[in-house]
Amino acid sequence: MGQHVDVNLHGRRSGDQGDPQAATASLAGAIDGAIDGRIDGAIDGALNFYKPRGITSARALYRIRRITGVRKSGHAGTLDPGAEGVLVVCLGQGTRLTEAWMDQPKVYRATARLDITSESFDADGEVSEVRVEAPPTVERVRDGLDQFVGETDQVPPSISAIKIRGQPAYRLARRGQRPVLRARRIRIHWIHLHGYRWPEVDFELACGRGTYVRALIRDVGAALGTGGCLISLTRTAVGPFRADRAWSFDSLEAERSRRRWLTPLPEVHSMLARRPVAIPPAPPRRPSGA
């Protein structure tokens, strides 16, 4: 049954008898507030949120809970502290769909350098220089990226949140225990090279769950005989959620009505039930050598 909405119309009419326009505005506000209250009573669905750089996904979730007042929530797909972009936040009964969100394709825009590396394969770790006798050509870099399109086995970085005997791998690594992670089957739908000027590579990719872009650039560097270190990473899409329509901390705090930022549960079900799953199209390729 729907929740009863009690609006004291008589009391508001009494207080506004001398000003018909004020009475109309007050009545409209009361109805709008009552509708918001009914929606706020059960917050089930998802939020398309843009996580900024510099904080963990867990800290972002805690702050979202404070802003929205929704305690039953979780995120689908961790973003490293140094990464930014779309973080799907599941709310209320929407938390039951976390795994379904994880299966949605993701799109990333990344910048990497081929003359350095680090233990974590990104710039958050201590970076060391890699000597390269002859920098690869743009054709070799493009071919190096393309060889990882499709299904491949990828060994996750030891600096990751993957659990080993109940402990995150990064904690074991920081204790000097050097966790050994097994290769996992991943799928990369496409990779597009946007630009290359030694030692920096700018590329974009669409991939399935479990893919580490840090590990990808590590493997690309190994194939090219160079280093490989991720410098910046932005997740621009998760399934139907796009970065250009995502909510920030500031926009959430400024928006009083949850009707704006909430993707209701029925709509989420409809999004995730679409088959075949839509793979975002790759950007058009430039001519060879461009």
Image: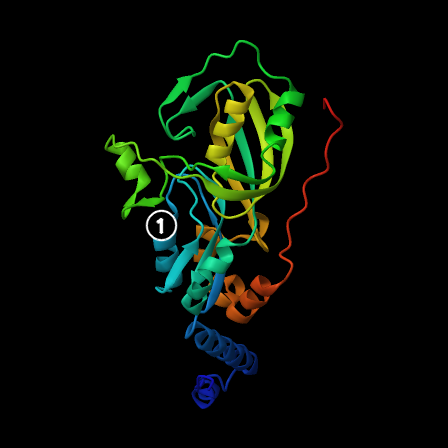
Question: What residue is rendered at 56% in x and 62% in y?
Answer: 272
The structure's colour scheme is: rainbow
In the depicted structure, whether residue 145 falls above or below residue 18: above
Q: Quadrant of the C terminus?
A: top right
In the depicted structure, whether residue 275 falls above or below residue 82: below
Q: Between 1 and 145, which is closer to the camera in this rendering?
A: 145
Residue 151's quadrant in the figure? top right
- Left or right for 165, reference 220: left
Task: Give x and y (percent) for residue 79.
Answer: 43, 44
Task: Give x and y (percent) for residue 144.
Answer: 60, 26
Residue 266's quadrant in the figure? bottom right
Q: Residue furthest top?
A: 133
Residue 254 seen in render = no
Residue at mark 1: 58
Task: Give x and y (percent) for residue 114.
Answer: 51, 21
Residue 219 seen in render = yes
- Left or right for 227, reference 107: left
Q: Between 267 and 9, which is closer to the camera in this rendering?
A: 267
Task: Give x and y (percent) for residue 43.
Answer: 44, 69
Q: Amino acid at mark 1?
A: Ala
Question: What residue is rendered at 62% in x and 56% in y?
Answer: 277
Q: Residue furthest left?
A: 175
Q: Residues within 10 Å of mark 1 (few under 14, many from 20)?
A: some
Q: How many marks?
A: 1
Q: Secondary structure at mark 1?
A: helix
In the depicted structure, whether residue 186 falls above or below residue 32: above
- Left or right for 5, reference 20: left
Q: Between 26 and 166, which is closer to the camera in this rendering?
A: 166
In the depicted structure, whether residue 12 falls above or below residue 235: below
Q: Residue furthest right?
A: 287
